[in-house]
Image: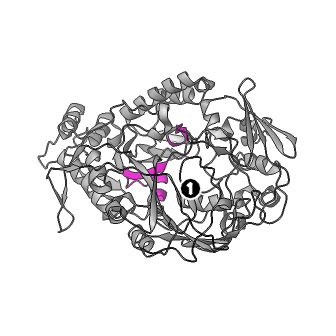
Amino acid sequence: MLKSKWLKLSLVVSMLGSTFSARVFAQEETAVSFESSVVNEGEAIEGGTLRYAIVGDAFAGVFNGMYYTMGVDGTIISFFNPGLYGYDENFTIDNSGFADIEFDPDNAQVTITIPEGTFWDDGEPLDIDDVIAPYYIVGHPEYDGVRYGVAFTNVVGMEEYKNGDTDVISGLERIDDYTLRVTYIDFTGSILQAGGGVSDYVEPEHILSDIPIAEIIDSDQVRQSPVGFGPYTLTSIVPGEAVTFEANENYYKGKPLIDEIVVEVVSPSQIVAELKAGNYDIASLPSDQFETYKDATNFAILGVEANSYNYIGFKMGVWDEAAGEVNFDPDRVVSNQAFRQAMAYAIDNDSVGSRFYQGLRFNANSHVTPNFGTLHNPDQEGYHYDPEKAKALLAEAGFVDNDGDGFVEDLNGEPFVLGFAAPTSGEVAEVIAQYYIQAWHEVGINVELVDGNLMETNAFYERVEQDDPAIDVFQGAWTIGGDPNQYGFFGRDQFWNDSRFADEELDALHARLNSSETFDEASRIDIYYEWQAYLIDQIPLLPTLFNYSLTAVNNRVSAYDVTTGSDLDWTEIYLLADEPIAE
């Protein structure tokens, strides 16, 4: 639930040219609460087609957990491959999923047991080799995806395999056709978290073993007709736009009650009208349009505090492919810590969250989201709107306006313009980007949109990841998964460290974060608090907004649950009418 408070907004959009003028006004934030599940009463129809909307840009079409990079692809994958294990409301691994997981901290081992007599949707038997295969794919020297993280590097013998010194990963012990024992180097707190220290991948070894590692990403198994073991089977694809699923008769929990699911990509600007017209059953809801659907009568609004945040990143170097690590450049303007802090104090994220997201997004004080409970430090101050402090920081660091043009020069006395990149993500994306630019201008920092426009989302992430020299500052958002350990986003040797920042103190904190020290709960909390404090002080990437994730569920859907770790299965969901109900 959001607390009622008074917020201020320091921006007004002119109807001409989307320019900004300084104007402050107060706005009361309305207290909002959401249910995380819904049950609709009625008589079930037989079968039927459920219409599911993915709200946003086109999907990339990489339908494999070991290779995809876009969240929308991950959503599609979840229908036909639910992964190895289940987890609870805190993302802690439990035995509610496909496999049973047994932890043995004394021996630094995890034992994975899968049920007997299960099948892939092509009818082939599923056994423990399908759990083992991803280790040999992701760990292979020719693997060109981005999943070679701690769930693999921490396995005993993986480094030798990765280096080509052996063909066998010694830390993998195949007990029998349905049991695998994995031995780890460090038994950390991340071992307990979904998406943390234990690989969640189950892949059809009988198909992938016939494909050279370097060719898997472009294979039919990944791009055209993936074989899965989930509730639904992917039957057709309209590239970037839509996929169709049919109920999987081989699903280990039984055939789902709904015959078909059609998933389509829908623009954020159109989704509310489409939902009210009864064209979709389930869809994520854009928080910047809350006022337009908060009183809808034909669908329920479900909400949970999300494990994601918006951010502003600072490009401080490039990725060194040969060295396999970031190459931090201390001479870049944004590589100056005080300069980054000044940019943080120049913007008013409380007001952005209140004005444009009706309080459904709110100022982020940490790189750990609040849903992780004790690991999130609620007392950490973070950054707040203080333009005078921003100006003081710039002056103290030596960024001074010597030529009187209203913008500071760099430490060598040279003028500069920072290139700002932001994706086309929602109706207010342009307005917010322009506000940030104007706010930076007002404290003397010259910033312009790269190419003069927002970028299509796929192009945006590609240019950021490829270290486009035109980009100095970038705005995005990401989900941190089930493990608050974000080494994959901030580690020196991690490609997804988009800011390309690294220093020895952060290296030391990451070493502790990835050590057995964190298996002790009290030590884990202490380390996470230290890590949060250091990241918020250095801000290689500034968390701007935490948010609520909202989902619309049409009244003809019998039940739905967005609670983290929900055990509601597609075999329990049915439809109450032939078509989605319109308002």
Residue 47 in the image, given as x and y percentages of width and height:
67, 73
Image quadrant of residue 203? bottom right
Within 10 Å of disc 1 (Cα), the crowding (few <14, some 14-19, many 20+) is: some
Q: Is residue 388 above or below residue 361?
A: above
Image quadrant of residue 324? top right
Q: Is residue 471 magenta?
A: yes
Q: Is residue 233 above or below residue 311?
A: below
Residue drawn at x 54%, y 77% is 579
- Determine whether, in the image, residue 276 is placed left or right of residue 77: left
Report the front residue among 502 and 410. 502
Report the front residue among 497 and 297. 297
Residue 447 in the image, given as x and y percentages of width and height:
26, 52
- Determine whether, in the image, residue 419 is placed left or right of residue 500: left
Farthest residue, direction left: 404
Residue 343 in the image, given as x and y percentages of width and height:
28, 42
Res 70 seen here: no
Q: Is residue 470 magenta?
A: yes
- Determine whether, in the image, residue 43 is placed left or right of residue 123: left
Which quadrant holds the N terminus? top left
Residue 25 in the image, given as x and y percentages of width and height:
15, 51
Q: Identify residue for label 1.
A: 69
Q: Secondary structure at mark 1?
A: loop
Report the front residue among 90 and 133. 90
Q: Amino acid at mark 1?
A: Thr
- Determine whether, in the image, residue 242 is placed left or right of residue 335: right
Q: How many marks?
A: 1
Magenta-colored span: 461-489
